[in-house]
Amino acid sequence: MRRTLAAISLVIAAFAGGAAFAAQRTVTLAVDNVMCPACPYTVKQSLARVAGVSNVVVSFEQKTATVTYDDQKTTLAALTNATTQAGYPSRAVQ
């Protein structure tokens, strides 16, 4: 009985531990083709549709998008793909 309880506890701990590794990340993307004041709206909408994205701020002046996302639900590649598909190729800036 103790072995069974220990095994069940171990399995539960393993599954619960996976959530502990999830993290909110923030990345700034340099966005190409932002030529008019209306472009940031399209960039923001394309990023906001990506699962796991919780916040997007786009700057027309700096031609950047700052994105906060859950790294267990999406990736940097998915973010850059979203903007590229909308006609605004992007890349992470350091």
Image: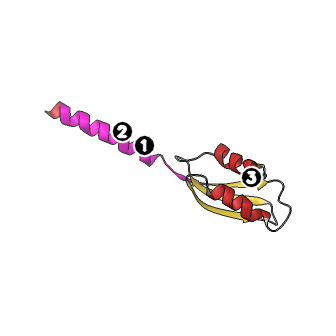
Q: CA distance from mark 1 to mark 2?
A: 7 Å
- Residue 71 in the image: x percent, y percent? 55, 48
Q: Quadrant of residue 60?
A: bottom right
Q: Secondary structure at mark 2?
A: helix
Q: CA distance from mark 3 to mark 2?
A: 39 Å
Residue at 30% x, 41% y is 12
Which mark is drawn over residue 86? 3
Please name the amino acid that badge 2 sits on. Ala
The 10 Å Cα crowd at callout 3, few under 14, some 14 to 19, many 20 or more, is some
Which segment did they paint magenta? Answer: 4-25
Residue at 66% x, 56% y is 47
User: Measured along the vertical axis of the image, is residue 14 above or below residue 70?
Assistant: above
Please name the amino acid that badge 1 sits on. Gly
The 10 Å Cα crowd at callout 2, few under 14, some 14 to 19, many 20 or more, is few
Residue at 49% x, 48% y is 22
The N terminus sits in image quarter: top left
Which mark is drawn over residue 14? 2
